[in-house]
Amino acid sequence: MTHNEAMTITYIDNVQNYHTSNDTFSIALMLQASTVIFIVQHGTGTLQLEDRNYSLERGQAYVILPKMNAIFAEHDTDRGVRGFFIAIHFYEPLTPNNDEVRPFRRLEWPFPEAGKLEGSSETEWLSLAEQLLNVTAADGLRAIVQAELMRSKLLLLLMECSETGKNKQSEHVISQSIVYMDKHYYMPLDRHKLARLAGMSVWHYSEQFKKQTGQSPIAYLNAIRIQSAKEKLLSTDLSVIEIARQAGFADEYYFSRKFKHMEGVSPSAYRKLKRNKIAAASFPFTGQLLALEVVPYVAVVDQGRDSHRSSYFNRIPYQLQRSEQIDEDIWHFNTNMLREARPEIIMCSEEEAATYQSFSDSSSKLIVIPWMELDWRQQLCMIADALGKRREAEVWLKDYDRKAKRVAGAIQARIGKAAISIVHVKNGKLYVYGKRNGGSVLFDCLGLQPAYPYEQIAVFHHVSPSELGLFAGDHMLVIVNKDKQSRDQWNSWLQSRIWNDLIPFQKSQVYEVNEMPWLDYSAHGHDLILNEALQLFTNPSYIHE
């Protein structure tokens, strides 16, 4: 049976059912001479191909090229891993020397690169392997016909996997191109340079980029640049010319035209329009306002803890205090500050509403945003409705979801279905996070695999050090408060043998991250968490300072 009948002939040399521990010599002989498709029948373990590791899953197929360094390791040593090994070759017919002899030349593997084959189901591969094993052991015309049919089916599966592999590769390349744009938008970039960096032709790059994002590369790049300019217009007093230059626009007039086309107003008018006298009396609501491109007139600020908002500090004239425990002195300071600022609107949660109720009787309008009753998306939309910015909120959420999808794809391509936990050392105690803060981004927005039933944890859950093994997973993000008690306790736990036996510690997959933005339950905070998560899981050299 031919793959491309006039060009290539496919030959299945051997089909065997081997145990990766008991049949090591036979497997080694097969791998030495042939390209092998290995299909897991039962058992769990890992397959190391050169410097890449794959978790072995029932029904999944893996390509091993001749003489490739392949190492099988079983998780269940009593049972091991058993599977089907299909040795396959491809030949190209050459011009015959005479009427009777037609020579052939052996070809290299023409399908996806070595490793896991994507795109076909567990049932398809197992069914095909079992039928091939049976038919190669049979004799007669019927067996010959069945073998031809099985070879055709094998080729169809490989072609499907090849197409899936190419699509995934293109998606990965475009995702990396977007990451590059996010980091280098201020540099001189055009389609030709971006396509060259992606290793594609300009036409193919543009087509794949628009297919994945719905925009052309330059339109997407300009959107990043305009977003950067908008942030600087609100958070600095730089001139429009300088902001245009820092955002990557060499021509101030082109920048102004592009800005007005996208935002409906000139950069200068935008700067004046967005500076409203709004008080965000609850910490998370500042993050919601920033996502709507509104810098509050009054906001809760802790310059030591809130470094992720530092670019906006000098644009907030009245800064309220916050701490782990809000005492009477802080409440007194904050109410006096609000009285002096006289904002037009005060936004707070129901917890602060009673304190700030008196301000609603004066010139300020009090808007109470339910904290536990609404999630961060609903809170963003409620705040947007109060400011007449519902459309801006919907656009922001749509862009965020697109970004989350790209980030999720990049992370899952690196860590697969590995389980993740997010842990907080606070006041010397240990907590895991669930449906809010960083847990909301990791498990809801990115759809990563949680190491515990996160949906049952409203915000956080206290665990004892001995219980951490029940929550650890494969990758662990750790937030350690800066107080001495928490830092000392964390250092002590790091020396614990029980903890060092956990998978994240054994595999060096413990990532210590800052409190912010991981505990900022707001749109702005979540967007920053996406950026950090992408760096943590896809850039091995990334260390959060």
Image (spheres, helix red, strand yellow):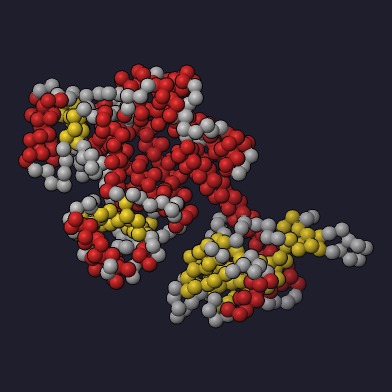
| Residue at (16, 41) in percent of width and height | 322
Q: Farthest residue in the right direction?
A: 98
* x and y, in percent, of residue 101 in the image: 89, 66
Q: Tell me if 68 is positioned left or right of 519 in this view.
A: right
Compared to residue 280, the image places residue 43 above or below, namely below
* x and y, in percent, of residue 141 in the image: 76, 72
User: In the depicted view, which residue is nearer to us: 435 or 121?
Assistant: 435
User: In the depicted view, which residue is nearer to us: 448 or 220?
Assistant: 220
| Residue at (87, 58) in percent of width and height | 95
Query: Is residue 123 visible to the viewer in this orientation of the structure?
Result: no
Compared to residue 485, the image places residue 213 above or below, namely above
Which quadrant of the figure has residue 245? top left
Which quadrant of the figure has residue 401? top left
Q: Tell me if 356 is positioned left or right of 442 in this view.
A: left
* x and y, in percent, of residue 24 in the image: 58, 78
Query: Is residue 219 visible to the viewer in this orientation of the structure?
Result: yes
| Residue at (16, 38) in percent of width and height | 321
Compared to residue 364, the image places residue 539 above or below, namely below
Compared to residue 274, the image places residue 485 above or below, namely below
| Residue at (49, 73) in percent of width and height | 73
* x and y, in percent, of residue 460 in the image: 23, 54
User: In the depicted view, which residue is nearer to us: 144 or 313?
Assistant: 313
Question: Looking at the rendering, in which quadrant would you find the N terminus?
Answer: bottom right
